[in-house]
Image (spheres, helix red, strand yellow):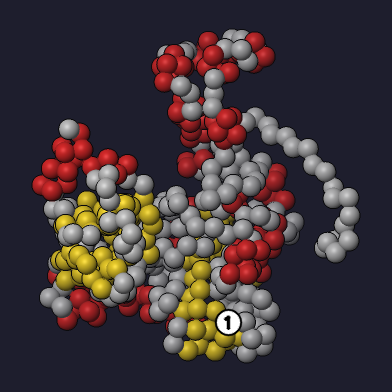
């Protein structure tokens, strides 16, 4: 009964069906692309034994992620199914849109053939915004060609060809998608434990970062946003670096091996990134290297935050630890707790995650506790309370006051690096 209800709901909302494939778009419901960047959510299903389909927009594969859809599996138990989220950069299609009645086509393909498709419309105003974003991207790419360097040898002797970049000094080879310079080859991914990111960082600049960007813009300079994630728009003044090709990212790279010439940037932003890298000191040294003399460096790093992964979380830092990352002769202009780092964020984060990791019956009791019920008793006396002892293992790891490990050195170190 439930499966039938779900099938009817999907059919009413525009499910495309064929003998072997199902295809549905959930968002945007209007089938309109608003601005240069948008997310498209949906799912597809296929008959077991049939090749797993993939997605293309106007013949190109967009940046997209798989999403779990248990509701679809319930509704169509005889089909394999997979949800998806597309991070669409419409600026890549600005010329095509102008020539195709302002329309983009999302295709489900299998064995190189289109098995289902949906069209999306773009308004005149949105097309102008998309075209402006495309122009900004082209301007930044030209600047980058003059300021990138090989991440292996730091030589600026790079040769650009269609789809490829080669270092004439060390013969390192890299990729160019046409929108992103990819300086993240497989050996660097393995060396620095770079994995696909499931969670998407989509934060706006705080007041300090926004002011720094505007000051650099007024001077006609460039800001490096290192570990940018997904930003709301393409900004001429900001070069965005990340390990995932979000639509607003200009360069794929690891923080420990930045592919830029020394002293290339007027300002550098590192906003809640260094907790996710294997060696924050090496990353900090790279941020310093690419910053111009007299330039501004703005770094935020968590102190009291639960474990969270993009996809890994290695280090938090006190205020003394943050200062220790950078050279002693760097003048401290501000050292503050920003609004985005107020203690209330940590308090709410800890409590909400704690409640989430409790069994349902204990969760309700926990949410009805008063602060005084916890604070008026010593922590040791709380250890046997059900809301403490029944916390999941995952909850304990994410919220641990301390963690501990016992290691054993290999009996033989022959052949191992020192």
Quadrant of the image containing the C terminus: bottom right
* Viewer-nearest residue: 220 or 57: 57
Judged left or right of residue 312, residue 83 is left
Residue 109 in the image: state x and y as whole percent. 28, 68
Residue 277: name its quadrant: bottom right
Residue 326: name its quadrant: bottom right
Residue 110 in the image: state x and y as whole percent. 29, 68
Element at label 1:
strand
* Viewer-nearest residue: 132 or 387: 387
Residue 251 in the image: state x and y as whole percent. 49, 71
Determine if residue 211 is in view.
no
> On the image, numbered disc 1 is attached to which residue?
173
Q: Is residue 415 above or below residue 203?
A: below
Determine if residue 349 is in view.
yes
Q: Residue at x 44, y 13 (%)?
A: 365
Q: Residue at x 58, y 82 (%)?
A: 173
């Amino acid at each position: 009964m439930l499966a039938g209800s779900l099938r009817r709901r999907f059919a009413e909302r525009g499910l495309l069906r064929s003998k072997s494939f199902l295809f549905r778009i959930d968002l945007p419901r209007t089938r309109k692309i608003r601005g240069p960047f948008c997310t498209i959510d949906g799912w597809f299903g296929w008959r077991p034994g049939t090749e797993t389909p993939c997605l293309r927009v106007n013949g190109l594969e967009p940046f997209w992620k798989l999403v779990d859809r248990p509701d679809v599996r319930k509704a169509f138990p005889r089909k394999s199914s997979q949800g998806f989220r597309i991070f669409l950069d419409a600026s890549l299609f600005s010329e095509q849109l102008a020539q195709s009645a302002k329309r983009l086509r999302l295709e489900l393909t299998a064995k190189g053939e289109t098995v289902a498709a949906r069209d999306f419309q773009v308004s005149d105003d949105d097309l102008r915004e998309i075209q402006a974003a495309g122009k900004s991207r082209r301007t930044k790419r030209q600047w980058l060609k003059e300021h990138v360097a090989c991440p292996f040898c730091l030589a600026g002797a790079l040769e650009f060809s269609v789809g490829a970049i080669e270092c004439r000094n060390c013969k390192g080879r890299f990729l160019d998608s046409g929108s992103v310079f990819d300086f993240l080859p497989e050996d660097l991914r393995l060396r620095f434990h770079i994995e696909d990111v499931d969670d998407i960082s989509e934060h706006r600049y705080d007041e300090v970062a926004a002011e720094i960007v505007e000051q650099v813009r007024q001077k006609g300079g460039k800001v490096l946003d290192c570990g940018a994630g997904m930003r709301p728009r393409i900004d001429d003044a900001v070069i965005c670096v990340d390990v995932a090709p979000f639509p607003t990212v200009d360069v794929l790279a690891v923080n420990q091996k930045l592919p830029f010439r020394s002293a290339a940037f007027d300002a550098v932003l590192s906003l809640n990134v260094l907790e996710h890298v294997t060696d924050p000191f090496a990353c900090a040294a790279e941020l310093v290297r690419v910053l111009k003399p007299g330039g501004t460096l703005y770094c935020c790093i968590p102190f009291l935050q639960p474990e969270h992964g993009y996809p890994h979380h290695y280090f938090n830092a006190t205020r003394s630890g943050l200062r220790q990352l950078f050279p002693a002769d760097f003048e401290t202009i501000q050292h503050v707790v920003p609004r985005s780092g107020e203690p209330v964020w940590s308090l709410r984060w800890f409590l909400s995650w704690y409640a989430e990791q409790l069994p349902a019956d204990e969760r309700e009791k926990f949410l009805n506790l008063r602060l005084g019920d916890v604070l008026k008793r010593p922590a040791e006396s709380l250890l046997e309370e059900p809301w403490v002892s029944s916390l999941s293992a995952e909850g304990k790891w994410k919220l641990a006051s301390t963690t501990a490990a016992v290691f054993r050195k290999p009996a033989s170190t022959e052949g191992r690096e020192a």
